[in-house]
Amino acid sequence: MRNRPLYQSVEAEEVSLSSASQLRSLKFVQLTSKTEPALLGDYLMEIGAYSVSITDHDADTENEKPIFAEPDRNDDADIFAAVICGDAAVGKNVWMRCDVSAHFADSVDVLQIVDDVRCTFDLGSNPRFEVDDVPDLDWVKEVQSSWKPVVIGGFILRFPWHKKEDVTESLENAGVVDAVDIEKYTELLLEGGIAFGTGEHPTTQLCLEYITNIVKDDDNSEGENTIKQFLDYGAGSGVLGMAACKLKPEGLEAVGVEIDGDAIRIANANAEMNQVRMQSYLPRHLGGDDESASLIMKAMKRSAAPVLPEELDGPFFDACAANILAGPLISLAGTLASMLKPGAPLGLSGILAWQGEDVVEAYSELFDDVKVEKEKGGWILVTGTRKNE
């Protein structure tokens, strides 16, 4: 015999099965750090919540204060590293005022939960809260419907559930209606997973446009620097490496390097779906900062992700794109230089406009003609060419 779920009201025992499957949202609002929002979230999960989220109550107002962000130009780097890479990385940072939302079965006694929160957290009175019904929707379909095929840089990025008419609609919205023009676009199929890189972010778009330019220019070149081996560093979903392979399906192979084991699995699945010659790996070295080293070590322990073979960990590649963030990119200047052949083109993004000068300076010692190539939506693309040494 099954026990009654925790916090189920007596009246709820008489509800129909269809009603019992409905969800109710319980939101505690304007909680300060003294209430320990993260601990409250854990408590709500323990007593039967299906999901919990913590959001900034002051989001999109003049009182909003980001806690997960790139440092300001005037921030002290050591302080920023301690706050963001330390506390925020393990969930200790919270906003000044938080909302904690939890989804419970409709049969749960919400008022009893609120009162128990008051007692458990030793509050003088019941915390402020709101209760709403959660629409009975197929949330998988709802999310899928919100992700449209992305048309950018000569590519159409789509997910497995997209139909031909979805792709046609996105092309039309991008002003591509002529059949001849449509044929010029290359399709990339992406798995709907947790890896970063769906083509919607300006940095991905900047990199895709850069890759299109260097690979197409290479088709007309006559020299030693023909692009046959392409490096996608910080590969995420593998979209950049796959794009390079699609542009030159007969003569180009790509290697992805990524510190997240799940992303490597998804990137390799994406490469197989698109029938391109690309394989992603964990880096051979732990990285230039403690946070990266920790992530790589965890990925090695909990996943079967392969590590970059030794023969690829040298001046092996003819071109590279790296879409990460300014801080890691600066620390990776030596690593990327060591993996590229002399004369190899390099494209970097994940860089905010005001960070461009620091990135250019970090790479100028090892690369020629390092410059800010392009800007889109406050993000920039930095390019250069590996020096002959």
Image (cartoon, grey):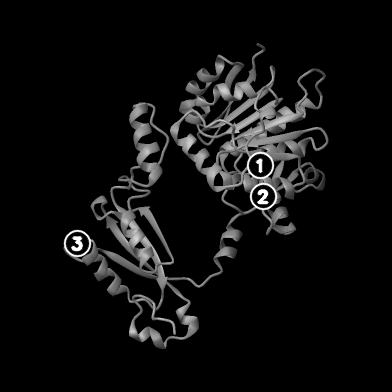
**Quadrant assignment for the N terminus:** bottom left
Q: Residue at x 32, y 47 (%)?
A: 95
- The quarter in which the C terminus is drawn is top right
Q: Earlier in the sequence, mark 2 or mark 1?
A: 2
Circle 2: residue type: Leu
- The residue positioned 80% from the left and 21% from the top of the image is 221
Extreme-top residue of the structure = 389
The residue carrying mark 2 is: 190
- Asked if residue 181 lies left or right of residue 379, the reply is right
Secondary structure beneath dot 1 equals helix
Q: Residue at x 59, y 18 (%)?
A: 370
Q: Is residue 25 visible?
A: yes
Q: Which mark is residue 92?
A: none
Q: Nearer the viewer, residue 47 or 76?
A: 47
| Helix, strand or loop under label 3 | loop
The residue beneath circle 1 is 239
Q: At x 57% / y 20%, what residue is drawn?
A: 371
Q: Amino acid at mark 3?
A: Asp
Q: Position of residue 175 (x, y in %)?
A: 69, 46
The answer to whether residue 67 of the structure is visible from this angle is: no
Whole-angstrom CA distance, mark 1 to mark 3, is 50 Å
Where in the figure is residue 380, as x and y percent of width and height? 54, 30
- The image's mark for residue 122 is 3
| Pick the front one: 151 or 189 | 189
